[in-house]
Amino acid sequence: MKIFRIFVPKNGLNYTHFMKEWFEWINFDIAFPITDPTWIFFLVLVIILFAPILLERLRIPHIIGMILAGLVVGEHGFNILARDSSFELFGKVGLYYIMFLAGLEMNMEDFKSIRMKATVLGLLAFIFPLGIGIWTNLHVLDYGLITSVLLASMYASHTLIAYPIVIRYGINRNRAVSIAVGGTAVTDTLTLLVLAVIAGMFNEKGISEMFWVWLVVKVVVLSVVIMYTFPRIGRWFFRRYTDNVVQFIFVLAMVFLGAGLMELIGMEGILGAFLAGLVLNRLIPHVSPLMSHLEFVGNALFIPYFLIGVGMLINVNVLFGHIDSIKVASVMIVVALLGKWIASWVTQKIYGMKALERELMFGLSNAQAAATLAAVMVGYNIIQPNGERLLNEDVLNGTILLILVTCVVSSFITEHAAKRVAMSDAELNEEKGQEKERFLIPVANPETLDRLMGLAMVVRDEKQINNLVALNVINDNNDSVKQEMKGRRSLERAAQIAASANVMLKTVSRFDLNITTGILHTAKENEATSIIIGLHHKASIVDSFFGNLTENLLKGTYLQVMIVRFLIPVNTLRRIIVAVPPKAEFEHGFVKWIVHLCRMSSQLGCRLHFFAHPQTLGYIKGYIQKKHKDVLTQYQELEDWDDLLIITGQVNYDHLLVVVSSRRGSISYDSAFERLPMQISKYFNNNSIMLLYPDQKGDPSEALSFADPRGWAETQYYDRVGNWFYKWFKKDS
């Protein structure tokens, strides 16, 4: 019986012997590695369940985290699980799935509009890393020609890891972004063709003189067949059958049909899966139940299973125990980054683009993930006639470091460039206040209902009718009947308040297992533009300041959210103190919240007192003087946002303190926002408070994708390190 091994010093405790005796004492017969399929599947599910929770706190990309989890439980780690046939089966399914989802992520409409520029970038992003990589692999790493070509093709591929960042900043229609997205389809397709050709060489019994010609002909013909027939079959099927389950099974069948046809002609199946994703993405909207089902199944089971299986193959001792492994990993990282930068630079020069656009293209095109991982696994599983693997363990381990480093670099550079582009393009849209608006007011708490409705009445546009929606979400549990009666009384009370002011109010009551999702779905269904919600009341010392509901709500929507706590009735407020962070003028919802506060000030007849950075004050003052001259205002500079202590003496009991905050990763976000809960609890516990989160462009990602990991959408801790180095070098220069 092979018992669980833990590496300890020679003079240390014998943990293996201890565990053996402990298991014998409790009469629990277990051997390591575990080979029983039931326990293997259970432990894999446990890893899939808890790993993302830990990874989110450590800011580790999910694709890397799952691989590391596989390393820990695998043969080269603690040897807990045996890599049985289930990892082979689910691994292959997961590999096809990850390539299929990567194909679905491609926006072919963007490619059409800038097809020439995107084709040029795609070709350059393929040629330069391939050329530099082949030479480096031959002369620096001393690899053979075929190995060098396959390894160099890995440098050429990339995945749009950082694309959610540009969506968040609202610059996804920027020329450089569209070129990078379109170029991705060209680059990855060429990379997979190289992979398919090399894999096909080793699938043949022998290589004839016509091998290359015949191979290319087969790939081209089958690719045309897939691209011509699959969309037409899909269109016919989706028109005829609308059931989500049936559609889901159909799409999976098409994916594996494409993969199977590629394998039938001697190619690698991942090319067929990728092509299936490319041609079917028009039929599968990104916001649709079918897309949700596809991503759910893949991200919940198939892809994590595949990634854990990859991690079980990694031998850390090889990576850090041999200088050759470090050399291979270093060369892979340098060549991949250098090749992508040269491609972006040449594209910039050809089309006379700005340096900032080059930075965007480079940031979006240098992250290695899906195609790279697929290529290395195919090469690792190919055994050459001499008995050696086409891509050895050094390359396998180096690929993990390559994915990690390029994802970090891609996220950092794209974040930096996107923020600058958004700031340069930002303009005050003075017509925002004229757009149709609708406020959603959850009224679950009877104690805060009156004041929430009071706030909604004074910030709404009187010229618009039916712009208030009161909501009560009922948990579908054993007390649902009791909750329904309580919610009905709250909605009736809200309707009475609105009717007394001759204001139309729509009331909504819905059942949902989760209150947050109930609010979000209602906001979408009723086209809400702002949400007004009460501040969470801490029930215990370990309870968070905002509470889970509010935190999840801020993550789930980019609409304007007003989180309020009124200690006195709204109509009794005498002054509104507004603390505004630097760069707030560049946020999408800047004008909207100014308009709402001006309405509130006019309705209540109280003064608006702004504390902000001088530049931000200039924007606020200019807009109010132009559009709201009658509003009583006062302005005061707030140079240091890190501490709100400076305004404690300005806020009285009958004042309302409005703190304009922002979500993580937005232009005006500052690390000082993390201390807001502590500062408010300490300095303003006896004051009425409004925490205002302005509108942001784009839509938040409700789920992470392993094919297109979204964990890098927010500013990471290494950003601060990078900024520190930048300031240090700038100071010394």
Image (cartoon, rainbow, N blue to C red):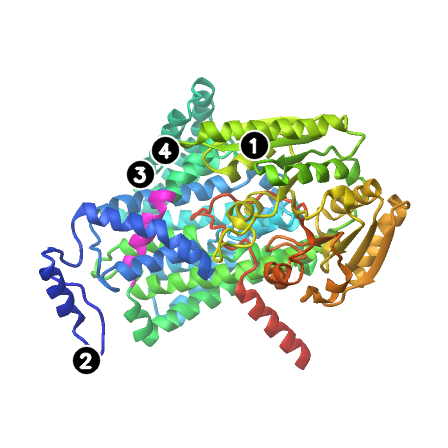
Q: Write down the quadrant of residue 140 in the picture.
A: bottom left
Position of 43 with respect to 133 (left or right) is left
Mark 1 or 2 closer to N-term?
Answer: 2
Pick whichever of labels 4 and 1 is earlier in the sequence: 4
Q: Position of residue 101 (x, y in %)?
A: 44, 42
Which segment did they paint magenta?
A: 300-314
Q: Determine the CA span between mark 1 and mark 2.
A: 64 Å
Instruction: Give the residue type that dot 4 points to.
Output: Leu
Name the residue nearer the viewer: 367 or 191: 367
* Residue assigned mark 4: 252
Q: Are marks 4 and 2 in contact (CB under 8 Å)?
A: no
Q: How far is disc 3 from disc 2 in space, using C-alphas?
A: 55 Å
The residue drawn where x is 68% and y is 47% is 566
Q: Which residue is mark 2?
A: 10
Return the residue at label 1. Answer: 472
**632 to 355, vertically: above or below:** above
In terms of secondary structure, where does tag 2 sit?
Answer: loop
Dot 3, how many residues are within 10 Å of its Cα: few (below 14), some (14-19), or many (20+)?
some
Foreground: 654 or 131?
A: 654
Cα separation between marks 4 and 1: 39 Å
Density class for disc 2 (Cα within 10 Å; few <14, some 14-19, many ≥20) is few
Most common SS among magenta residues: helix
- Nearer to me, 553 or 169: 553
Q: Are marks 1 and 3 in contact (CB under 8 Å)?
A: no
Q: Residue at x 73, y 60 (%)?
A: 582
Q: Closer to us: mark 4 or mark 3?
A: 4
